[in-house]
């Protein structure tokens, strides 16, 4: 039922920044806890960050902690992922999806995946 669309990816140099957006097709995003995931070619999908329904709880993968910030604006039906100090290892397709909670092992269950947006960090 929930449809999500990711955008904001692109090509940036190491040390640069991008802000990804995850937009819901209807004005019901506040019902959902959202996670950001990424997958590089030949690699397993990795949970990057999550945010609870009203933004009071967040979690981050160790690999992005201190560099990425997740936020949401339910009035705009949008979840954001601010990505700073990007490194080549961040190169991947980034997806958002609905998850059950933003607690322990939050990344294990997800649904309503978006189509993804490509992030490439390269000189």
Image (cartoon, grey):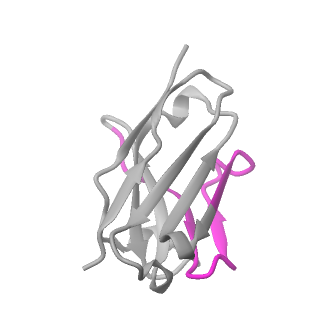
Which segment is the magenta one? 43-70
Residue at 33% from the left image edge and 70% from the top image edge = 25
The image quarter containing residue 59 is bottom right
* Nearer to the camera, 61 or 6: 6
Q: Is residue 101 above or below residue 123?
A: below
Q: Residue furthest top?
A: 123
Number of marks drawn: 0
Residue at 42% from the left image edge and 63% from the top image edge = 23
Is 66 one of the magenta-colored residues? yes
Q: Tell me the quadrant of the picture where the C terminus can be found.
A: top right
Residue at 69% from the left image edge and 79% from the top image edge = 56
Q: Residue furthest right?
A: 66
Q: Position of residue 34 (x, y in %)?
A: 48, 71
Is 105 one of the magenta-colored residues? no
Q: Position of residue 55 (x, y in %)?
A: 65, 76
Residue at 64% from the left image edge and 35% from the top image edge = 17
Q: Tell me the quadrant of the picture where the N terminus can be found.
A: bottom left
Instruction: Tell me if 91 is positioned left or right of 58 in this view.
Output: left
Instruction: Tell me if 31 is positioned left or right of 109 in this view.
Output: right
Q: Residue furthest bottom?
A: 31
* Nearer to the camera, 63 or 116: 116
Q: Is residue 119 above or below residue 57?
A: above
Q: Position of residue 62 (x, y in %)?
A: 65, 52
Q: Residue furthest left?
A: 1
Q: Position of residue 41 (x, y in %)?
A: 32, 34
């Amino acid at each position: 039922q929930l449809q999500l669309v990711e955008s904001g990816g692109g090509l940036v140099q190491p040390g640069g920044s991008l802000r990804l957006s995850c937009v819901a097709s209807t004005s019901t995003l506040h019902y959902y806890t959202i996670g950001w995931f990424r997958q590089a070619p030949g690699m397993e999908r990795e949970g990057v960050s999550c945010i609870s329904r009203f933004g009071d709880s967040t979690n981050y993968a160790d690999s992005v902690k201190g560099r990425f910030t997740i936020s949401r604006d339910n009035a705009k039906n949008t979840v954001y992922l601010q990505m700073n100090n990007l490194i080549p290892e961040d190169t991947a397709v980034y997806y958002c999806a609905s998850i059950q909670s933003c607690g322990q092992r939050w990344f294990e269950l997800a649904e309503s995946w978006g189509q993804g947006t490509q992030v490439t960090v390269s000189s």
